[in-house]
Image: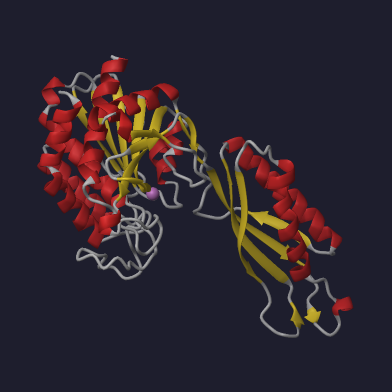
């Protein structure tokens, strides 16, 4: 089957794919709570005569299509939503107050089910195995890591894995990506500064003021990227919240700051953490305070998403066959994070951006915002891309 035929078949399934997407969109669920979502995925797979695995990583699952032998290609979708109140005004807008599919994971799940439908219809011709991976908790819960730990890439062993993300910067009909580092390694940080000696603000000499210490620390942390990091390796240190004290006239005991740190390499992220620890401790000491950089339960670090070269070449050739070379673009890396990185630490593969921007529909807002919209014309393209990537990779690896 050539790319144009495949795209036509996927376009013939557009209403089916969009129907699933809209159903998911109305009932978004937060990380590790994707109960209804995974039930819908299971039911849809069974309706297609595909038997899903028992639950993995709480609400995740895998399923295979093909002859059960190698090579094996993994196709991954994430299923969770975000704690955002939707303001799109769509007639299939979220029915759950305060929760919204604002990162397009409803689209990712629906597109992968669309690929399952097409691949199942041609199963007798598939020489090898395709493993569908539906994971929970991409948004901060490292569901991908848990899926890997629970064996999502084993039995059969996945030789190449592929993921798609809707991309609101890229017009519908375009597909983008790159070889090498594509998305950042990310860590949420929590920094606690303690004076251990609060007191009356009229008697500052009898206290140790953690607010003053934290103020100097925040300024000093901004020297890390400019003075310690290689300017050619992009990094970010952002302090995004500070809480401490609550009276006009009391010097508090403790101040807590939160933030995010990012680097295009996993090693670079570790170095940022070490620098923060050192600067915070030493600056705090100068003000007779202490500083502690804490880890945050339930919010593990994400490694950098690094696309493997031959996988990106296969993906961009598969994309070229679908939408022609003028619509396949090399993208710059971005400092967003993505837990697809956990799969790429264990096997070859690549992560690809699917254009969903369409000004005439108001599909222009960024992910993680209350007005985020997707041009649904992109969904069959994403489905066809999954199928094309799997078939091309099986051909290459056989
Ligand atoms: Ni996302």
321 or 25, nearer to the observer = 321
In the image, residue 271 lies at what x, y percent?
67, 41
Image color mode: secondary structure
Q: Looking at the image, which residue is at 34% across and 53% down?
A: 80
Residue 247: image location, x then y, percent: 69, 84
Q: Residue furthest top?
A: 398
Image point (15%, 23%), residue name: 1
Q: Residue furthest right?
A: 205
One can see residue 157 in this view = no
Q: Is residue 376 visible?
A: yes
Residue 116 lies, with reference to residue 317, above or below; the image says below
Quadrant assignment, res 348: top left
| Left or right relative to 390: residue 301 | right
- Total numbered labels placed on residues in the image: 0
Q: x, y percentage for residue 367?
A: 39, 55
Q: What is the quadrant of the C terminus in the image?
A: top left
21 to 67, vertically: above or below = below
In the rendered structure, the answer to whether residue 31 lies left or right of residue 302 reads left
- The x and y percentages for residue 100 are 33, 62
Closest to the observer: 2 or 325? Answer: 325
């Amino acid at each position: 089957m050539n790319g144009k035929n495949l795209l036509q078949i996927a376009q013939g399934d557009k209403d089916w794919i969009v129907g699933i997407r809209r159903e998911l969109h109305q009932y978004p669920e937060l990380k590790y709570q994707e109960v209804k979502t995974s039930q819908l995925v299971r039911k849809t797979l069974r309706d297609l005569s595909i038997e899903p695995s028992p639950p993995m990583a709480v609400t995740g699952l895998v399923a295979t299509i093909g002859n059960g032998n190698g090579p094996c290609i993994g196709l991954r979708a994430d299923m969770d939503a975000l704690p955002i109140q939707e303001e799109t005004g769509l007639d299939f807008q979220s029915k759950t107050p305060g929760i919204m599919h604002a990162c397009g994971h409803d689209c990712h799940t629906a597109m992968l089910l669309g690929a399952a439908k097409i691949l199942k219809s041609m199963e007798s011709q598939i020489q090898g195995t395709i493993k569908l991976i539906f994971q929970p908790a991409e948004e901060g819960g490292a569901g991908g890591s848990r899926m890997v730990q629970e064996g999502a890439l084993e039995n059969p062993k996945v030789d190449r894995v592929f993921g798609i993300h809707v991309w609101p910067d890229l017009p519908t009909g375009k597909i983008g990506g790159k070889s090498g580092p594509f998305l950042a390694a990310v860590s949420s940080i929590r920094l606690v500064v303690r004076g251990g000696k609060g007191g009356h603000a009229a008697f500052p000499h009898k206290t140790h003021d953690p607010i003053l210490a934290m103020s100097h620390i925040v300024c000093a942390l901004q020297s890390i990227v400019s003075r310690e990091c290689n300017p050619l390796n992009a990094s970010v240190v952002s302090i995004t919240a500070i809480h401490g004290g609550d009276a006009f006239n009391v010097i508090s005991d403790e101040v807590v700051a939160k933030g995010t740190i990012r680097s295009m390499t996993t090693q670079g992220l570790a170095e940022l953490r070490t620098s923060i620890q050192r600067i915070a401790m030493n600056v705090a000491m100068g003000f007779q305070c202490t500083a502690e950089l804490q880890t945050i339960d339930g919010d593990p670090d994400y490694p950098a998403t690094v696309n493997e070269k031959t996988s990106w070449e296969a993906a961009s050739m598969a994309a070229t066959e679908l939408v022609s070379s003028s619509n396949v673009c090399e993208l710059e890396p971005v400092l967003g994070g993505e837990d697809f990185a956990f799969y790429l630490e264990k096997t070859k593969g690549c992560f690809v951006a699917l254009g969903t921007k369409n000004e005439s529909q108001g599909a222009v807002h960024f992910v993680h915002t209350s007005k985020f919209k997707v041009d649904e014309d992109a969904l069959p393209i994403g489905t066809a891309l999954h199928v094309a990537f799997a078939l091309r990779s099986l051909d290459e690896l056989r």
